[in-house]
Image (cartoon, coloured by chain):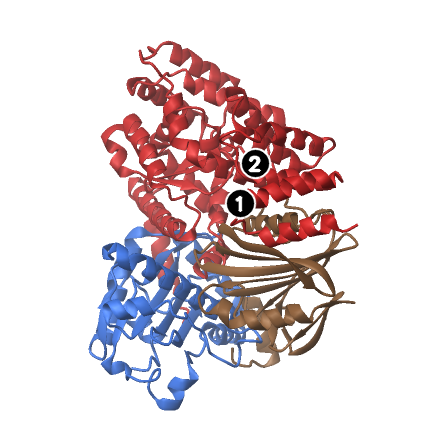
Amino acid sequence: MVRPTIGAARGLLVALLLAGCAGPQELATTEAGLRLAADEAEARLRASGRVVRDPELDAYLRRVLCRIVGERCAEFRLYVLDQPGFNAAAWPNGVIEIRKGALLRLENEAQLALVLGHEAIHYQNRHVAQLWGRAEQAVGVGALVGTVLGLRPIGEAMGVLAALSYSRDMEREADRLGLERLAAAGYDPNEAPRLWAALLEEKARIGDSGQLAFLSTHPTDAERIAELRAGAARLPVPVSADPTGRAAYRAATARRRGAWLAAELRARSFAASEILLDRLRAAEPESGELLFFAGELRRLRDGPGDAEAALALYEKARGRPDTPVEVWRSTGLVALRLGRRAAAKDALATYLARAPTAPDRALIEQMLEDQDRP
Amino acid sequence: MRFGLAILMLALAGCAMTEPKVAPEALATGSVGSGARIEEAKVLLLPPDLKVGEVGVAGQFKPRADWTEQAARNVMAALETKLAGRVRLERIDEASLDPAERADYERFATLARAVGQSIVAYGQLPTRRDRFDWSVGETGWPLARSRGARYALLVQMVDTHASGELIGLNVASFAVAALGLPAVIRTGAHYGRADLVDLETGRVVWHNFMLSQSPVADLRTLSGAETAVEALLRALPI
Amino acid sequence: MRKLPLFLVLVALLAGCELGPQGPVLVSPGPVAAGRLAVQTDVAWTQMPSKPPRRLWTVYGPLLDLVVLVDGLEEGQQLFSSEASAGTPVAFRAAATGAELGEFVLDSLRREGASAVSLDSLRPVAFAGGEGVRAEFRLRDDRGVAKRGFAVARVIDGRLFMILFVAAEDHYFPSLAPAVERIVESARIV
């Protein structure tokens, strides 16, 4: 039962006043509490199915992390999240999460090292604890009950976090140290300003689509990029055949890229996805996979002229070694939309011939039958 | 004590505890589940899910790691004291599960927790009110085989304590309530939930849930944990 | 909850307990009119508060099992009206082919926090007196519970009519699927 004794309350208030404001004792307690919350969130994340489990990819990311962070990399646990959009974050208990949407947008190993290293610095310099502390203020007791009853998705707390950002000073600290580590690990430090500038440009062109959550938590402006350029210029570019590690990054991520692009398009932020695909295609103009997904973007967007454009892209993609078999299915669907029944029939029949275990086989067969009817 | 405050406290009491739920077959036979009486069977204790922290003036919850660790030790000790004499209890240590067991265990634990949460959140739905037939299906079989256990006990508790500022505020709320006016008293709260699952049949054979807007017992002390465990596991059929 | 006299009820409401009538409602076995979708159910369901043209039914609670009846979703509308979705909404397109309807359902589930969503099959079926499409899928929800489901849908005059069922793969799906299949078979558009 409720026991509100005035004496006890006063005594506590006095004790608190004497203890003063948040001393190191309280901060340590808060940090420990945040660690606890993070541990629990990690357990739920592992159970949730949101983590992309790919041992080879995980091993590669780990290698890069250890190269940039050094021996302390043993403190971290890396998770690739099944979410589109560019984001990466460190948690107060040593978790570093990176979305597959980020892995799609990074161009080379140097940029990957930069992002992982940057988050590691925020963790090691206790910026993360401070950020989470602020988030914790925003979560009320209603959320407590919801969380306790498990009725609220894990994403909600993370959503609150995404709304907060590191301070300019924290970013400066992370930038300075990040550049040094990048160079010391043998990467080209100019990749740092390059990456931030590319993100900023994407945001400027399409506005805040939510695909660039990374920029929200890490505020960036022209001044920051200029400082990064100046800092990078003072550091030596490593002498190496591939100082940005472009080939190594491509090799490690090629297998997964198709699935990531499919998920990216599903988020339906077409403006951002178009910029991404344009950039990727510029670097690999012969890639059938990229041509296919450029077509998919137009098929899903379905704006004026998109259907025709999609068909043209599918046509270019067909016959290339890295084009997925779904190109035939998509060709058929778009041809149908444009009323080109003969072309649709051909394409869908080819799809069925080449993809015997397609889950939508029965449906496609029906569609073919329908085309035969007058 | 003023009438208004008395009414408020009565109402809080009315909202605070629900009756523990027992599956009908257990009521009928006096034993839990068909077959083995629970005294003869082994009960797996999953790691209790505990959180202890402070509630501030705005209602925000701050978990305290030190309090939670204390609570974990106390609650575990209290559970063992309460149960060890009467059943064969085996604690599950999630960290030391071998990989072969882990996937099956997680499938069971994930579903069992979702079921436990559903009993609390949705146990009063029109299609649930007059029956108690919750199940985890066959997900408990691998665990039953590998550990030779018949039952699993899942416990969850959240304990919140008013921070200094909130206690000060409560004094004012009581003053208001004492005048006979309704006032929501936002003290700390205690929430506890326990489910006993028959791993062979998959049925949740026993469930209890407690939510009170006052600390039932302070989990940071051993005696407090013993009080909370006693209240939560009251009418556990063993 | 024990029954409380009226004035205690009022105070209890202040203290935050839920006793109101505009919450979940019982759907008894028999014929049910879900707007223009008329169905027959031989088991009882709880209808949860929801925004038309969707109706949410459950037996054990939406964490474990959920039936969504959609009667006349319009062009541009989302399947689930949750504000939690980030990015451009997954919108229904009246001109969607069967294949695109399948994508619409799975993408909508993904937006609600489902992960590892995979399509087991997508095929044409008769539904509600006409030609429709049926998708069968698996997924994991936000808590990591493995779930299984199916959706049967048809577009009439540019509007989507659908019955979707998702439930925990262990016990709940096998236990309730037959009852939902019978609801689907009985469905008619009025």
Find residue B157 and name its label.
none
Q: Nearer the N terminus, badge 2 or badge 1?
A: 2
Q: Which residue type does callout 2 highlight?
A: Gly
- Front-most of A314 and B140? A314
How far from the left and from the top, in percent, is residue A246? 40, 21
Establish if B44 lies above or below A297.
below
Q: Residue under circle 1? A: A355
How far from the left and from the top, in percent, is residue B184? 53, 64
Q: Which residue type does callout 1 highlight?
A: Ala
Point 60% across, 27% down: residue: A316
Do the residues at discs 2 and 1 belong to one chain? yes
10 Å crowding of disc 2: few (<14), some (14-19), many (20+): some
Establish if C22 lies above or below A133.
below
Please state, as top left, top right, bottom left or bottom right, where the N terminus of chain A lies in the image. Answer: bottom left
Please tell me the colour of chain A. Answer: red
Point 24% across, 56% down: residue: B98
Location of residue B40 (image quadrant): bottom left
Find residue A210 and name its label.
2
In the image, which is nearer the foreground, mark 2 or mark 1?
Answer: 1
What chain is colored blue? B
Residue B78 shows in this picture: no
Point 74% across, 38% down: residue: A340
Point 41% across, 43% down: residue: A52
What chain is colored brown? C
Element at label 2 = loop
